[in-house]
């Protein structure tokens, strides 16, 4: 079975029309994103923060066909964050001010994906920034240029490659959920900037760029609601935020105060792959959760994208010598460029 998927991947590099999935190209710009500690840009163009509480999971996006959670880690302040308002109550305490996204959970079509960044003070790439990658409750390994794809085509996880910027390396993974016309996003994993690390912790964390919201019909969640064509009146303060290479107006407050629906607790989930936040829209098919737990390693095919020195195999698959070597790494370099994703 693995060899069959390998041939499909090689042919796909020559002709996009014969594959269920699409490789991201340099022309694809993110329609929504978050980075750092963390700063968001919604699909509506609004910039805001959502810090939540360390150790808690929150709904990033919830739709009838797709649910994504994020788990926070970081340093708590002395302020009471439990009742922090995302609804603009100026009298409410504000949330912890130094958090990062440490783990991401995805639910789609009876499948689950959990990505967790490693901990510790080591900021070098080493064997990778991922502590674990779990598909359908089974731990998996994902090496650079490799793809993991479910047999039903509903979920694809592709290690795009590694880039370096400002002395720090970044690992990039592409995820496509819902098939060829589903949602597609890039997950970047890297440590914090050196001057923002703490003794004993390099704060390796996730940043995400959404390339496509295909298939979303009724999205909500911290980022998901920014895809909605809502005419609801909102009242929120803004401030000017400076970064190393740009400035932007951003909603004032730690949790999109006055801009996001509800409160921080409205987005809290009981676990990384639990679709039980107050704004959950996810409608998993009956019995799918049980089926997901029964999945085995055999339900996932591992494909290695064509790498340098494999041109002969491309010819054997009917690709001739036209397939460029090292294409996975080239895609990663085009996607990331020299942009700084930290801080």
Image (cartoon, rainbow, N blue to C red):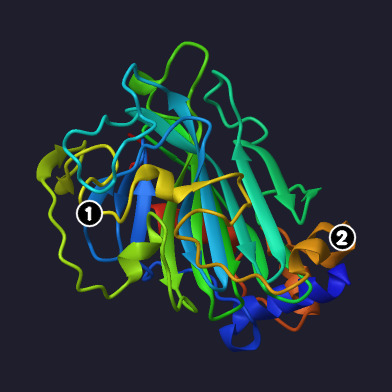
Q: Is residue 208 left or right of residue 81?
A: right
Residue 132 in view of the camera: yes
Q: Nearer the viewer, mark 1 or mark 2?
A: 1
The residue that label 1 is drawn on is 259
Q: Nearer the viewer, residue 316 or 41?
A: 41
SS at mark 2 in the image: loop
Q: Nearer the viewer, residue 209 or 250?
A: 250
SS at mark 1 in the image: loop
Residue at position x 32%, y 34% in the image: 343
**Which quadrant would the N terminus be assigned to in this image?**
bottom right
Q: Position of residue 171 (x, y in %)?
A: 54, 44
**Image quadrant assignment for residue 196:** top left
Badge 1: how crowded within 10 Å, few (<14), some, or many (20+)?
many
Query: Compared to 277, does 265 lie above or below?
Result: above
Q: Furthest residue to the bottom?
A: 17
- Mark 1–mark 2 distance (CA, rounded to whole Å): 41 Å
The disc, 1 or 2, on the residue closer to the chain's N-terminal end is 1
Residue at position x 44%, y 60% in the image: 279
Q: Position of residue 105 (x, y in %)?
A: 60, 51
**Image quadrant assignment for residue 298:** bottom right
Badge 2: how crowded within 10 Å, few (<14), some, or many (20+)?
few
Residue at position x 61%, y 77% in the image: 179
Q: Is residue 50 left or right of residue 23?
A: left
Query: Compared to 142, does 330 lie above or below?
Result: below
The residue that label 2 is drawn on is 294
Q: Position of residue 252 (x, y in %)?
A: 17, 41
Q: Position of residue 14 (x, y in %)?
A: 61, 81
Q: Furthest residue to the top?
A: 199
């Amino acid at each position: 079975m693995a060899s069959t998927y390998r041939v499909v991947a090689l042919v796909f590099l020559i002709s996009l029309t014969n594959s269920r999935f699409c490789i991201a190209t340099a022309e694809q710009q993110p329609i929504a994103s978050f980075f750092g500690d963390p700063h968001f840009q919604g699909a509506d163009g609004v910039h805001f923060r959502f810090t939540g509480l360390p150790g808690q999971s929150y709904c990033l996006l919830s739709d009838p066909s797709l649910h994504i959670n994020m788990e926070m880690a970081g340093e708590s302040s002395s302020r009471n964050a439990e009742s922090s308002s995302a609804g603009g109550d100026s009298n409410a305490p504000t949330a912890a001010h130094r958090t990062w996204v440490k783990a991401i959970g995805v639910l789609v079509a009876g499948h689950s994906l959990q990505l967790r960044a490693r901990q510790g003070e080591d900021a070098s790439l080493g064997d990778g920034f991922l502590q674990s990658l779990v598909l359908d409750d089974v731990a998996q390994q994902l090496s650079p240029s490799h793809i993991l794809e479910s047999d039903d085509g509903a979920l694809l996880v592709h290690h795009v490659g590694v880039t370096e910027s400002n002395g720090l390396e970044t690992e990039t993974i592409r995820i496509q959920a819902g098939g060829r016309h589903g949602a597609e996003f890039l997950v970047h994993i890297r440590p914090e900037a050196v001057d923002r690390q703490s003794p004993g912790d390099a704060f390796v964390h996730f940043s995400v760029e959404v390339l496509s919201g295909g298939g979303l019909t009724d999205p909500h969640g911290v980022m998901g609601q920014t895809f909605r064509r809502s005419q609801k009146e909102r009242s929120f303060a803004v401030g000017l935020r400076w970064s190393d290479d740009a400035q932007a107006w951003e909603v004032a407050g730690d949790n999109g105060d006055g801009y996001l629906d509800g409160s921080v607790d409205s987005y809290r989930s009981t676990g990384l792959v639990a679709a039980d936040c107050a704004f959950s829209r996810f409608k998993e098919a009956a019995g799918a959760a049980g089926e997901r737990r029964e999945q085995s390693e055999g339900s996932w095919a591992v494909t290695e994208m064509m790498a340098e020195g494999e041109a002969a195999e491309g010819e054997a698959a009917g690709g001739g010598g036209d397939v460029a070597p090292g294409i996975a790494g080239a895609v990663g370099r085009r996607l990331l460029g020299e942009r700084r994703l930290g801080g």
